[in-house]
């Protein structure tokens, strides 16, 4: 299909390990977003890429979190030295432009043991 | 932090009945979006309503927006068991928050056949 795809769909890791989560946005969408959904905090914005502009990182919870978007398409969210509180579903979304409809991927469910 | 507050937190109805969910927010917005989430899956976009719009329809869905009261409602008419899901409102505040969505805690809707 032509929707947003994310991989892996599930990831189990040990505390202290690094993880990489991947997002493939809808072709032609210039904006890409990462959100996190956890039981305690609900749905939270993490980071936003728009075209070639500097990303808006204002939602990243700590410097252990980082994200890249290569070639204006695929994005990778990296969590270093994972902690148990990082356990959540990480959702990626893309849109044609800022303030347009955001289309979400199925998410990556991360469990840190 | 969550800007939106949704009411009710849970709603249980019979098939064929209408379901109304409300969302209140605190700051001015550029647009407001409603999403549906089936358990453990990604978010499905329902309707986007801009700040200069008062009402939008899509099939059995009707969304209203009252910017003076900073509130929105989602009405699902003639509900079906397949409408059982969590429903979230999300606001795009524009300005320096352009494109970032702030989600409410959601309403859990259960439609009994």
Image: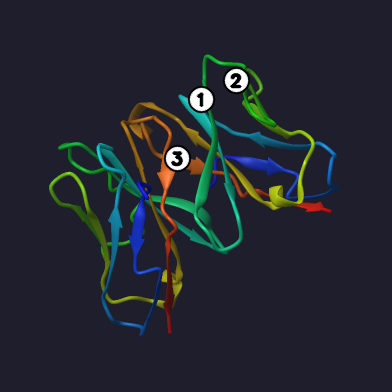
Circle 2 marks a residue in which chain?
B
The residue tagged 3 is B101
Q: Are marks 2 and 1 on the same chain?
A: yes
Q: Position of residue B113 (x, y in %)?
A: 84, 53
The residue tagged 2 is B67
Task: Decide if residue B1 is in sight here.
Answer: no
Q: Do labels 2 and 1 touch, CB within 8 Å?
A: yes
The residue under the point 31% across, 31% down is A97
* Dot 1 crowding, Cα within 10 Å, few <14, some 14–19, many 20+: some
* Res. A81 image quadrant: bottom left
Query: Which circle's residue, 2 or 1, is located before the other in the chain?
Result: 1
Task: Decide if residue B54 is in sight here.
Answer: yes
* Colour scheme shown: rainbow
Q: Position of residue A102 (x, y in %)?
A: 42, 39
Q: What is the C-alpha distance between the residues marked 3 and 2?
A: 17 Å
Circle 3 marks a residue in which chain?
B
Q: Do labels 1 and 3 touch, CB within 8 Å?
A: no
Q: What is the C-alpha distance between the residues marked 1 and 3?
A: 13 Å
B39 displayed left or right of A73 = right
Q: In terms of secondary structure, where does tag 1 sit? A: loop
Nearest the viewer among B26 and A34 is A34
The residue tagged 1 is B28
Q: Do labels 3 and 2 touch, CB within 8 Å?
A: no
Position of residue A78 relative to residue B82, above or below, is below
Position of residue A15 relative to residue A34, above or below, is below
* Dot 2 crowding, Cα within 10 Å, few <14, some 14–19, many 20+: some
């Amino acid at each position: 299909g032509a929707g947003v795809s994310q991989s892996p769909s599930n990831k189990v890791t040990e505390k202290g390990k690094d993880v990489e989560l991947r997002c493939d946005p809808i072709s032609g969408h210039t904006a890409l977003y990462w959100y996190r959904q956890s039981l305690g905090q609900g749905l939270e914005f993490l980071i936003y890429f728009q075209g070639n502009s500097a990303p808006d990182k204002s939602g990243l919870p700590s410097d252990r979190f980082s994200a890249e978007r290569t070639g204006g398409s695929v994005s990778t969210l990296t969590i270093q030295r994972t902690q148990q509180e990082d356990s959540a579903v990480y959702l990626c979304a893309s849109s044609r432009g800022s303030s347009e409809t955001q289309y979400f991927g199925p998410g990556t469910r991360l469990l840190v043991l | 932090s969550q800007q939106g507050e949704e009411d009710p937190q849970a709603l249980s109805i019979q098939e064929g009945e209408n379901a109304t969910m409300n969302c209140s927010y605190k700051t001015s917005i550029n647009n407001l979006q409603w999403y549906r989430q089936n358990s453990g899956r990604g978010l499905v976009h329902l309707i986007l309503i801009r700040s200069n719009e008062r009402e939008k329809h899509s099939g059995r869905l009707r969304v209203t927006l009252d910017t003076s009261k900073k509130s929105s409602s989602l009405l699902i008419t003639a509900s079906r068991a397949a409408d059982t899901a969590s429903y979230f409102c999300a606001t795009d505040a524009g300005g320096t928050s352009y494109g970032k969505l702030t989600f409410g805690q959601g309403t859990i809707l259960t439609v009994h056949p």
